[in-house]
Image (cartoon, helix red, strand yellow):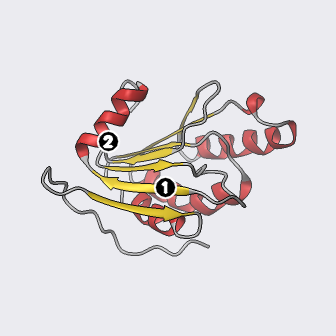
């Protein structure tokens, strides 16, 4: 169960960059808060999907897509998953799609980041939709400029 706090978007200012570091224990609460507060769009890049993480985030994803928020998940195709994870990934991809999520597949994908409303960027080593037992790090940055830089750098502007 992920506990959510009230929305805490702050305005972006070129003079002051807001950045915060999270680990595998502190990340999901902050992430869930920001996801729930999306006003326009959410992009999540996670190479893998597992039951534990998608199940935790799916209620929030369903709630925001019901409000008309565009949610896009970029992941590996299930055929690129280990054999024992393929059926699990296919199942969650189907449930995400039936919840209104656009799914993109990128071959050899290993990026881990999320963008909310083109002003909040999470980036680091944590597989957002599959993390389990590993020690990880994610940085949350509020910056329209850095978020746009990431969108352009990876070429996803045509998808979101």
Residue drawn at 64 percent across, 54 percent down: 54
Cα gap from disc 1 to disc 2, whole angstroms: 15 Å
Q: x, y (%) of residue 45?
A: 53, 41
Between marks 1 and 2 in the image, the one whose residue lies nearer the viewer = 1
Q: Label 1 crowding class (10 Å Cα cut-off): few <14, some 14-19, many 20+? A: many
Helix, strand or loop at disc 1? strand
Q: In this view, does 97 lie to the left or right of 122?
A: right
Q: x, y (%) of residue 32?
A: 48, 63
Residue drawn at 72 percent across, 51 percent down: 50
Q: Is residue 75 above or below residue 67?
A: above
Q: In this view, does 131 lie to the left or right of 19?
A: right
Q: x, y (%) of residue 22?
A: 48, 64
Tell me the quadrant of the picture where the C terminus can be found. Answer: top left
Q: x, y (%) of residue 62?
A: 52, 55
Q: Which quadrant of the view contains residue 78? A: top right
Do residues under tags 1 and 2 come within 8 Å of each other at their CB atoms?
no
Q: Residue 45 carries which label?
A: none
Residue drawn at 68 percent across, 46 percent down: 49
Residue at the right extreme, as displayed: 84
Residue drawn at 34 percent across, 28 percent down: 152
Q: Which mark is residue 138?
A: 1
Number of disc labels: 2
Helix, strand or loop at disc 2? helix
Q: Is residue 133 above or below residue 151?
A: below
Tell me the quadrant of the picture where the N terminus can be found. Answer: bottom right
Q: Label 2 crowding class (10 Å Cα cut-off): few <14, some 14-19, many 20+? A: many
Name the residue carrying label 2.
Answer: 147
Q: Between 21 and 86, which is closer to the camera in this rendering?
A: 21
Residue at the left extreme, as displayed: 15
């Amino acid at each position: 169960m992920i506990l959510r706090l009230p929305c805490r978007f702050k305005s972006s200012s070129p003079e002051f960059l807001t950045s915060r570091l999270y680990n595998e224990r502190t990340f999901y609460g902050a992430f869930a808060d920001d996801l729930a507060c999306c006003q326009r769009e959410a992009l999540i890049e996670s190479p893998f999907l597992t039951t534990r993480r998608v199940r935790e985030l799916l209620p929030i994803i369903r709630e925001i897509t019901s409000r008309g928020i565009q949610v896009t998940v970029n992941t590996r195709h299930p055929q690129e998953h280990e054999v024992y994870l393929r059926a699990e990934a296919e199942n969650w991809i189907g449930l995400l799609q039936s919840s209104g999520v656009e799914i993109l597949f990128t071959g050899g994908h290993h990026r881990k980041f999320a963008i909310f409303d083109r002003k909040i960027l999470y980036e680091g080593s944590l597989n957002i939709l599959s993390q389990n037992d590993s020690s990880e790090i994610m940085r949350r940055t509020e910056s329209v400029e850095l978020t746009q830089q990431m969108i352009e750098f990876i070429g996803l502007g045509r998808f979101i």
